[in-house]
Amino acid sequence: MAVAEITQKTASILVVDDETTVVNLISRQLGRDGLACEKTSSAYQALELLDTGDFDVVITDISMPEMSGIELLKHVKQHDPEMQVIVVTGNPNVDFAVEAIRSQVDDYLVKPFELAQLSHSVGRALAHRALLRENRRYREELEELVGEQAQQIERLFMDGLSALAGAIEARDRYTGGHLDRVSRYALATGVELDLDTERMRVLWLGSLFHDVGKLAIPDAILNKPGPLTDDEYAEMKRHPELGVKIVERISFLVPAAMAILHHQERWDGRGYPSGLRGDDICIEGRILAVADAFDAMLTDRPYRRARSELQAVAELQRCAGSQFDPRVVDAFLKAHGRGFRDLPDLPLNGRG
Ligand SMILES: [Fe+2]
């Protein structure tokens, strides 16, 4: 058998028996088979040798003064489940057999045994070990491949998400680059607030898709070159709920639904669609409200000119505690002071 032949060339056997003559007999025979042997008469020393050496098979006597062969076998299997253990016994009985099977013995030899029997048993153990190793390597390779493919799928998925978000943004001619900026602002604020990875991911999705509901708002309202009428404004205010209806049908966007629904709520309860107040608004929604408003202030709109950054900062400060969660404004301003840098490792720039 090819595998056994290859293995036997480098195989190393540990022989444990308190009877020196048996140890010598076994190692002489295995030496003739071209195997490297290490001998010891102590089970404790065997454990030490196993810790430092690179063995393939352990051959152990059952009855030894300090520790039984079965006890040694248990330690060995715990340490290396692929290690092959052959036990040698003088008087096999049912108790021995049961205990040996329970302890996962790989083979046993009954004294006195034929030397050919020993060689055969060791050869089989080496082949079995080689097979176990081969299987493990194959499994590991497979796992690695699956991991790589999962990463590729994740990347494609993120690219798809970003493309979708870009398509939404393209419909709204006044907000070019808005989503990228809101993402940056929101995530940098999330970092200041010490949000965990899962919350950050929700925040990222929320920032890309907070206005997805605008897909369902007529162009005439969305891009109207003047102030909206009350009816038009009422229609526009439906976009958070319309957004939730859209993402509800896309499983990987569902976690962002709450952030989308809450991004137009106000800390003082005067926002929409539900007039939630304070902590009843999810943290992602409160962060998006600040990030979204800041970017809107810096952008020219049909009904007003863009403000300067200094003015926008002053406006956030003025509205902290009324429109915005003051803690979020604080965190946002800290992130602003650092230039919204040190963002977490998320595919923020998927759209290039
Ligand atoms: Fe919005």
Image: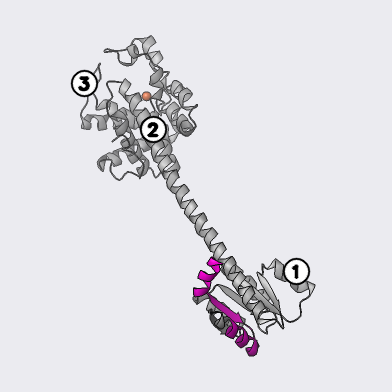
Q: In the drawing, does residue 235 fall left or right of residue 121?
A: left
Q: Kindly tell me whether residue 101 is visible in this rendering.
A: yes
Q: Secondary structure at mark 3?
A: loop
Q: Which is closer to the viewer, label 3 or label 1?
A: 1
Q: Amino acid at mark 3?
A: Arg
**Mark 1 highlights which residue?**
98
Q: Amino acid at mark 2?
A: Gly
Q: CA distance from mark 3 to mark 2?
A: 34 Å
Q: Secondary structure at mark 1?
A: helix
Q: Tell me residue 186's x, y (percent).
A: 35, 36
Q: Tell me residue 41's x, y (percent).
A: 61, 86
Residue 155 or 66: which is nearer the viewer? 155
Task: Tell me: is circle 3 under 8 Å from ligand 1.
Answer: no
Q: Is residue 248 above or below residue 352?
A: above
Label 3: few (<14), some (14–19) or many (≥20) C-alpha neighbours in 10 Å: few
Q: CA distance from mark 3 to mark 1?
A: 87 Å
The image quadrant that residue 338 belongs to is top left
Seen at 71% across and 71% down, the residue is 100
The quarter of the rendered structure image containing the C terminus is top left
Residue 167 or 278: which is nearer the viewer? 167
The quarter of the rendered structure image containing the N terminus is bottom right
Extreme-right residue of the structure: 94
Residue 226 or 21: which is nearer the viewer? 21
Seen at 61% across and 70% down, the residue is 125
**Mark 3 highlights which residue?**
305
Q: Amino acid at mark 1?
A: Val
Read off the magenta span. Answer: 1-29
Q: Is residue 143 above or below residue 57?
A: above
Which of the numbered marks, if any, corresponds to residue 160?
A: 2
Q: Tell me residue 161's x, y (percent).
A: 39, 32
